Image (cartoon, grey):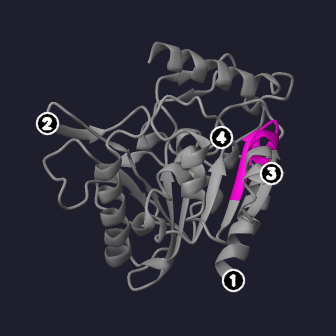
Amino acid sequence: MKLCGRLWLAAFVAVGAYAEELPDLSNVPRDLVVPEVSSAPPAPGLRSVQTTAGWQGTQVYHTIYLPVDWKAGGRFPVIVEYPGNGNYKNAFGDVSDGSVEGCRLGYGISGGRGFICVCLPYLEIKDGEKKNAVLWWGDVEESKRYCVATVHDVCARYGGDEHAVVLCGFSRGSIGCNFFGLHDDEIAGLWRAFICHSHYDGEIETWPYEGADRAAALARLRRLGNRPQFISQEGSTAATESWLRSTGFPGNWTFEALPFRNHSAEWALCDLPIRRKARAWLQGVLAE
């Protein structure tokens, strides 16, 4: 595992090294602030902490944000987001704590209106206790059960449109769009489209988990079908594009490079061309 960890770190550094000379996102003003989490019941404009039925009494929880224009009886598309790995900090000050509270993409791309935003954890089981996993996938089957149950619950209770559920994520969450979101036919069937920012399943085979190899990634990719994916990366998407071209899979992909050096989802909180493109892409996908 130590060798695998070193290979993973070397691959990660190599992928990010080319971006060092790019501008820094810290110099770009934010026009959005993600609401603080609350223990209050979900309400318009509020980001609440909840635990899905069946996991009460555990340490498992997710967050749900109801848009400011939410009304009972309405139907709203849903953005489901997975966070990046925790315990991460780089030389540019980019930080990821691996928590659902730290998610940025869904709220930023929606602008807080028109979409229900749900940030889900991966679940781990240690010493018989279930809790949110800060690193990688935890227990994949348990995480899948929580995801499927939560998506159905959000749609039933809060007017989410089960035909307009979009999966997104940053870093670990981006890889997870395929690794986890296309894990099997049941969970793969939940999603209308995907937004993957910074890394992609199969792009790097030395990630330290079982199933990181390209043969396994290709098996998952085949469950995507023709559903659209918006794929972005700081600096360049060339590594992901090269891997996907090599598969021969005729995907429905849109690639956008983030012209900043930061390994971060903070761009979604800034009025930047890439965010405008992501928003336009999403509206186009949902209009089809």
Give the numbered dot on residue 256: 3
Residue 138 lies, with reference to residue 241, above or below; the image says above
Magenta stretch bounds:
230-241
Nearer the N terminus, badge 1 or badge 4? Answer: 4
Residue at image point 76% right, 68% down: 280
The residues bearing labels 3 and 4 have C-alpha atoms spaced at a distance of 12 Å
Q: Nearer the viewer, mark 2 or mark 3?
A: 2
Q: In this view of the protein, can residue 19 be seen by the observer?
A: yes
Nearer the N terminus, badge 3 or badge 4? Answer: 4
Residue 133 lies, with reference to residue 117, above or below; the image says above
Q: In this view of the protein, can residue 42 be seen by the observer?
A: no
What is the three-letter code of the residue carrying label 4?
Answer: His
Q: Is residue 77 left or right of residue 64?
A: right
Give the numbered dot on residue 58: none
Mark 2 and mark 3 residues within 8 Å of each other at the beta carbon: no
The residues bearing labels 2 and 4 have C-alpha atoms spaced at a distance of 32 Å
Q: Is residue 125 left or right of residue 231?
A: left
Mark 3 and mark 4 residues within 8 Å of each other at the beta carbon: no
The residue that disc 2 covers is 128
Q: Is residue 144 left or right of residue 113?
A: left
Tell me residue 203's x, y (percent). 67, 40
The residue that disc 1 covers is 288
What is the three-letter code of the residue carrying label 3?
Answer: Glu
Give the numbered dot on residue 199: 4
Residue nearest the viewer, comparing 42 with 9: 9
* Tag 2 secondary structure: loop
Quadrant (top left, top right, bottom left, bottom right) of the C terminus? bottom right
